[in-house]
Amino acid sequence: MFQKKLGDFSIFICVVASLFLTSQVSHAQKLAVKTNLLYAATTTPNLALEYGLNDKSTFNLAYGLNLFKYPDNAKFRHWALQPEYRYWFCERFNGHFVGAHLHGGQFNVCNDGFINTGMLPGRFSRLDQERRQGYLYGGGLSYGYHWLLSSRWSLEGTVGAGYARIHYEKFDCPTCSPITGTGVYNYWGITKLGLSLIYFIK
């Protein structure tokens, strides 16, 4: 049930985002499509679109979706959406920028030695003992740098920190156990980390 809801909502988010951004293309001199290579390294397909608001500001919308199964019932299923406003110190899509972002998503995660839980925040470092599913929301601030490689291709590095409020349910079994508890976790720390490959649509 959770997987179906997660998939249906993810499709809805993609359709709405695509329609919104398409309606803005005629007003932007440049539109960029990108993928975060670090996020992809977690086996999570992801896509972001960014368009110019004016000479020194842009709007970035990033989305990731993971519905894969791993060995021994391990899973890192989730969707995540992160809109961000960016201010560029020189000109848009060139050099240094700072940003303010929001984020939200749903997750269903479990581990049996396949995932390095030491990399996960706080209470989620104990996923080798239980499964957790729920949702999160929050926001943060970021800094990044954009390298122009050609008229069409670029690279971008970014890092951000902020807050996420995480609501979750706990289960003992990876697939079939009843709920054994619920909780709310207030996370402060890294909320954005990326090395993105970018292609410009003009």
Image: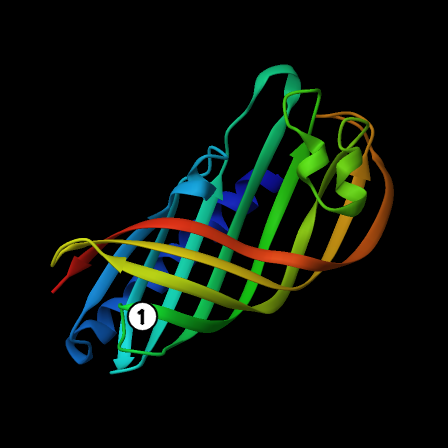
**Callout 1 crowding tier (Cα within 10 Å): few <14, some 14–19, many ≥20:** few
Amino acid type shown at disc 1: Phe
Quarter residue 191 falls in: bottom right
- For the N terminus, the image quarter is top right
- Which residue is found at the position 14% from the left and 56% from the top? 152
Left or right of 76? Residue 175 is right
* Numbered disc 1: secondary structure: helix
Left or right of 96? Residue 184 is right
| On screen, residue 114 above or below 54 | above
Residue farthest to the right, as pictured: 180
Left or right of 3? Residue 158 is left
Quarter residue 178 falls in: top right
Provide residue 21's location: percent of width, then percent of height: 28, 68
Q: Nearer the viewer, residue 32 or 8?
A: 32
Provide residue 195's location: percent of width, then percent of height: 40, 49
| On screen, residue 202 above or below 116 | below
- Which residue is found at the position 51% from the left and 52% from the top? 193
Q: Nearer the viewer, residue 156 or 179?
A: 156
Provide residue 27's location: percent of width, then percent of height: 19, 80
Provide residue 90's location: percent of width, then percent of height: 29, 78
Residue holding disc 1: 20
